[in-house]
Image (cartoon, grey):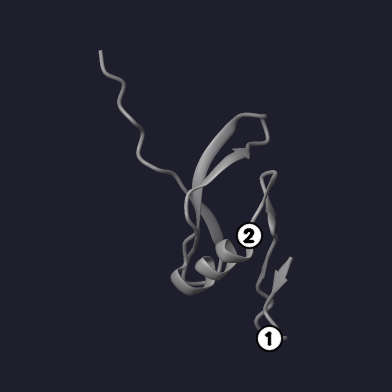
Amino acid sequence: MIKCPDEVCNWIQFRNVCGVLLSTNDIESLLKTRRTKLIKGMQSKSGKKFDAYIVLDTTGKSSFEFPPNKQKKK
C-alpha cells in the first residue's frame, strides 16, 4: 500500500490491483502523470481478464480507463 505522508490527506493506493502487483514505475507514473501504462492481465470479480490504465482524478480517486476496442476485420 502507498500512503500520503500528510495526515490530513488520507490518500492511499493499494499496490495489488485486480490480481496484478503495480511496479514502482507504475506508482511513480500514476503520481506524476495521473495515469499508468497499460496494465495487462487484471482480473475482474467475475473472473474475466482485462487490460486497462489506472488513472487518478483531481480528487485523488483512482479508476480504470480502457483502451479502444480493436475492430475485427470481416
Mark 1 surroundings: few (<14), some (14-19) or many (≥20) residues within 10 A: few
Which is in the foreground here, disc 2 or disc 1? 2
Q: Which residue is mark 2?
A: 23
Q: Amino acid at mark 1?
A: Val
Is 17 left or right of 34, judged from the image as shown?
right
Q: Which residue is mark 1?
A: 8
61 or 65, which lies in front?
Answer: 65
Q: Earlier in the sequence, mark 2 or mark 1?
A: 1
Quarter that holds the N terminus = bottom right
Q: Residue at x 56, y 60 (%)?
A: 62
Q: Which element is circle 1 on?
A: loop
Q: List x then y, in percent, for residue 74.
A: 25, 12
Q: List x then y, in percent, for residue 26.
A: 56, 61
Q: Which mark is residue 64?
A: none
Is 69 left or right of 27, judged from the image as shown?
left
- Indicate whether 73 appears above or below 39: above
- Indicate whether 74 appears above or below 17: above
Q: Residue at x 50, y 67 (%)?
A: 29
Q: Amino acid at mark 2?
A: Ser
Question: For the residues marked 2 and 1, what is the alpha-carbon distance in whole angstroms?
Answer: 26 Å
